[in-house]
Amino acid sequence: MTEFNVRGQKLYLSPVMDLYNGEIVAYETSERPLFGLVGNMLKKAMRRLSPGDQPLLHSDQGWQYQQPSYRRMLADRGLTQSMSRKGNCLDNAAMESWFATLKTECFYLRRYDSIEQLQKAIGQFIHYYNHQRIRLKLKGLSPVQYRTQALDA
């Protein structure tokens, strides 16, 4: 989860990244970092799973990810929880790197007058990042192109 400040108002973003291709498969935003933010994001991510999928879901040690209701949601769907070691940001480096990319390319370069403007921009950036922004690590393809190519092979 990451936080933005727009004219004294806060916006929180909770995304899920597929480490296979770096694609953001689900996300949720909220003006408060309540459990519902993470719960709704998790529900969206789980809708993307195929029957029988049992992925590992990694997070930092935020309080939301330690809630019994979060752990129950994972267990009910057969997902395995993985959590960063205390005080070790390197365990969550892929997500932290993506947050830095988002903030550098989408947030710091623009001035937002409202939370709603930023929410719209985040949605547009995620779509751009997933479908158009190439990554050298993915052989010059976008995350969606890379996944699609692998599925077609």
Image (tube, grey):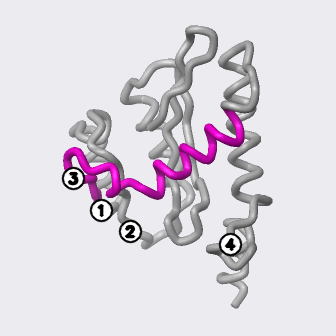
Query: Disc 4 marks which residue?
Result: 136
In the image, is 125 to the left or to the right of 75?
Answer: right
Query: Disc 1 marks which residue?
Result: 80
**Nearer to us: label 1 or label 4:** 4
Separation (CA) of disc 3 from disc 4: 29 Å
Separation (CA) of disc 3 from disc 2: 22 Å
Q: Decide which of tag 3 and tag 4 comes sooner along the chain.
A: 3
**Nearer to us: label 3 or label 2:** 3
Assign a secondary structure to mark 1: strand
Mark 3 residue type: Arg
Local packing at callout 3 (Cα closer than 10 Å; few below 14, some 14-19, many 20+) is few
- 89 part of magenta stretch: yes
In this rendering, is residue 85 above or below 34? Answer: below
Q: Decide which of tag 1 and tag 2 comes sooner along the chain.
A: 2
**Residues drawn in magenta:** 80-107
Query: Disc 3 marks which residue?
Result: 85
- Residue positioned most to the top: 8
- 93 part of magenta stretch: yes
At x 70%, y 20%, the residue is 116
Query: Disc 2 marks which residue?
Result: 54
At x 67%, y 66%, the residue is 143
